[in-house]
Amino acid sequence: MTEDRTPAVSENPEGAAAAEEDKPIKSRKNGLYGEISDELAASMKSGWADTELRGLQPVPQAAYAAERRAKLSAAFPGERLVVPAGNLRVRANDTDYAFRAASEYVHLTGEQSEDAVLVAEPVGEQGHVFALYLRPRSDRENGEFWLDGHGELWVGRRHSLTEAEELYGLPTRDCRKAAEELAAATVPTRIVRGYDAGLEAALTAQLDEEKDDELKVFLSGLRLVKDEWEVAELRAACDATVKGFTDVVRELGQAVATSERWIEGTFWRRARVDGNDVGYGSIAAAGPHATTLHWVRNDGDVRPGELLLLDAGVETRNLYTADVTRTLPINGRFDALQRKIYDAVYDAQEAGIAAVKPGGRFRDFHDAAQRVLAERLLAWGLLDPAVYDVEKVLELGLQRRWTLHGTGHMLGLDVHDCAHARRENYVDALLVPGMVLTVEPGLYFQADDLTVPEEYRGIGVRIEDDILVTADGNENLSAGLPRTADEVEAWMASLAG
């Protein structure tokens, strides 16, 4: 990584936001260059072509985002609403984590840049005027574009404010003025907390934490039903994820020779090529690691004869993610016990998927899957059928020793989407067309679990798919990956060598 960032030109910046007007452009303490000569400063100011983009068409989601903003406006009449995208976060010293804009902000705008803010100013008692606060293009007069670490020649070109207005269908302002401008007007204000500490601090006198929580809850619930554009994004995420799983199976030999990290890296490559990134930390859990629900260290051995539990999803460039799990025999074939456990999980998933339909309860797919698993645990003697029947097992939750987690969740911009929505609109709600959720039952027999026969210990199986509620039932968006044991073996054999 290049490291020289030279000091600022001595003259005052022109055209920069007032809040930053007197701030020098900082260089690294131990940079190799000293002061900038007048001749170099003059050279860098001139000789650049006009690169302004004109006649841009709105981004595809602009019309959908406008509908979402209209619903937001109707829910909070007379109040100013502030939805930040978030800021860069330091990884180490002067390097930052890759930026990922806040889901609430993206859902309402379609835009993804750091330090941005969507502001809804109340108009009268009912409506709002929305504006996007964004960072303008780098200033060429004060040298920001080549001297500042976040200047154009360091991190790439960003859209001008005029370009952004055309793309997102919103008036734009300089985000460096946002805190000052918003703090100057005393208006009842709500903000989505947790993304921009500086903005929260500037608006402290105007904010109420309880009201801010209500805004977050509303915006989470606003994402429960996906529109047609969002469904297309999730379909694309699933299609790319199918490719990623296929890549992994083709390279299992390399993983055996190295570690789980080969699997993680192989899937990540596909995520970066076909999307923005992985939607969450990939779980590449081989052997006993498959019994750890969120195994993301991915540093273990990959051994033939054991199972690989791969839980991974591609996030599209518009930040919608898939969430898919397959449990694969590393040598290409299940042994008898592995197949028995796998088939139980498959049957549970089938029962769960069948319960996903409009008018059904959100809980139904979980209850259906858990019932199948409880029945199998009783049939195998892991729970004593002389003491318990299925109803009692489910009442007491005894199956949870080996099933552990809920059977699914909403999916969208977040892998656990809509997590802050009201309970009555989510867990206790009825399903409606446009909802997208995962169905992911599992059985996990820990390596140190003395209540099960030794041969079970260290086996973990989960099967997960992304299910769209349709008008007449459901659609499996990730159906491109095989699910039955026979299909999995045949698919792996077809990719071998």
Image: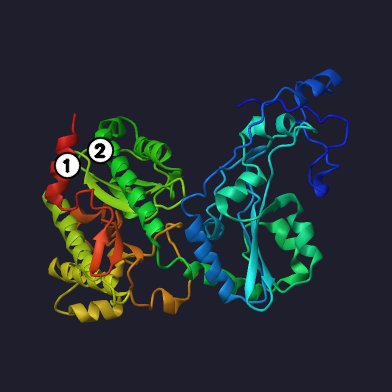
Q: What residue sits right under mark 1 in the picture?
A: 491
* Left or right of 225, for residue 146: right
Whether 204 is drawn above or below 125: the answer is above
Q: Residues within 10 Å of mark 1 (few under 14, many from 20)?
A: some
Residue 197 x, y percent position in the rendering: 69, 58
Residue at screen point 39% across, 50% down: 295
Whether 164 is drawn above or below 108: the answer is above
Q: Hey, what amino acid is under mark 1? A: Trp
**Quarter assignment of residue 50:** top right
Q: Nearer the viewer, residue 54 or 473?
A: 54
Q: Hey, what amino acid is under mark 2? A: Val
CB within 8 Å, label 2 to label 1: yes
Q: Residues within 10 Å of mark 2 (few under 14, many from 20)?
A: many
- Secondary structure of the residue carrying numbered label 2: helix
Q: What residue sits right under mark 2 in the picture?
A: 249
Q: Please name the colour scheme applied to the rendered image.
A: rainbow
Q: Residue furthest front?
A: 55
Residue 345 x, y percent position in the rendering: 21, 60
Q: Nearer the viewer, residue 339 or 409?
A: 409
The C terminus - image quarter: top left
Quick one: label 2 or label 1, which is nearer the N terminus? 2
Residue 261 x, y percent position in the rendering: 38, 37
Residue 53 x, y percent position in the rendering: 60, 38
